[in-house]
Amino acid sequence: MKYPLLHETLKVGSIVLKNRLVMPPMATEKSAKGQVTDGLIAYYGDMARSGPGLIIQEHSFVSPDGRASANQVSLAADADIPGLQRLTAAVHAQGVPILAQISHAGSAAHRAITGQEVISASAVPNPSRAAAVHGQPEFPREMTQGDIQCIIQAFVDAAARAQQAGYDGVEIHSAHGYLLDQFYSPLTNRRTDDYTGRTLEGRTRLQVEIIQAIRRRLGKDFVLSLRLGGSDYMDGGAVCAEVGQAAKLFEAAGLDMLSLSGGMSFFFRPGHTEAGYFAELAEAAKTGTTLPVMLTGGIADGAEAETFLEKGQADLIGIGRAALRDHQIYQKILSM
């Protein structure tokens, strides 16, 4: 066995993963106006046959105003459940657990797609869309306390639908410039209330309240992960040094697993192309939590993945883009 650590099992909440490789969430645009298609089911079934320890499905919007793209998967209505049941059944048939990633785009949403007002933590244009509307910045409306409570409920309701559809849990998307990342980042959170952008506690309050609310509704056995944009890699933004304390707050709220990413506007670490370019974020998270921590970012082979486990920088390794090129990559790595 060439990569013994990759073959080790790992308990994540109520489930046991058969190995340490994870298919991370990657948008495919394979849905049809939010609905599951045969092509989407075939895609995830094919990935599951390769044998990763866990699949985290591409992000699904929790409410219509939070839709990021026209063909993003929906978890915003009960009518979505039957199609998603077919998808989870295809993955479970291969003996692989699956989480649904749930998300609201916030100021990254497009009015032309949602037909609704764009909202965010503050009336600050999304850094990745600063010139998106006729060359002029689009200013979202700052969310009220009532809006925040509606968003929390939307995440809870989406998680409940995921449970009904057969998912083993959900991953809360707080990265890549979407709504929860907009609360986490000082660049886009200028609030001065309980969700203030001036303190880490304020910037993580919405995530903490969503974790707590889902846990109350769905119980201790439903797995909860969170993907955190740990550093914006932009002046004045979120930084790596805060990740350990944020992880501690999420664990106390009832989280089971933490996945690290970064780069609010880029989804990568500027100036870095090496395998595991978010390793500093995963390592920082492990200083503040006993939760399983997942690392993604440019990892493409078993030797790279095994090395991060050996160094104790992460507990799970996400291999994404390499799997898009070769759906059988997990099986190939584990068979060495």
Image (cartoon, grey):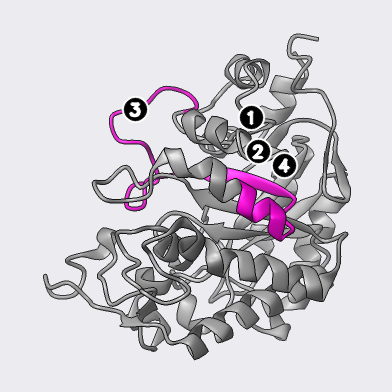
Which comes before the other along the chain, label 2 or label 3?
3
Q: Are marks 4 and 2 in contact (CB under 8 Å)?
A: yes
Q: Amino acid at mark 4?
A: Leu
Q: Nearer the viewer, mark 1 or mark 3?
A: 1
Disc 3 marks which residue? 272
Which comes before the other along the chain, label 3 or label 4?
3
Query: Would you call the spot at circle 4 few (<14 residues within 10 Å), some (14-19), or many (20 or more)?
Result: many
Q: Position of residue 58 (x, y in %)?
A: 59, 56
Disc 2 marks which residue? 293
Q: Amino acid at mark 1?
A: Ala
Q: Nearer the viewer, mark 4 or mark 2?
A: 4
Disc 1 marks which residue? 314
Tag 1 secondary structure = loop
Q: Nearer the viewer, residue 140 or 96?
A: 140
Q: Does the magenta segment cover residue 258?
A: yes
* Residue depicted at x 80% and y 23%: 7
The quadrant of the picture occupied by the N terminus is top right
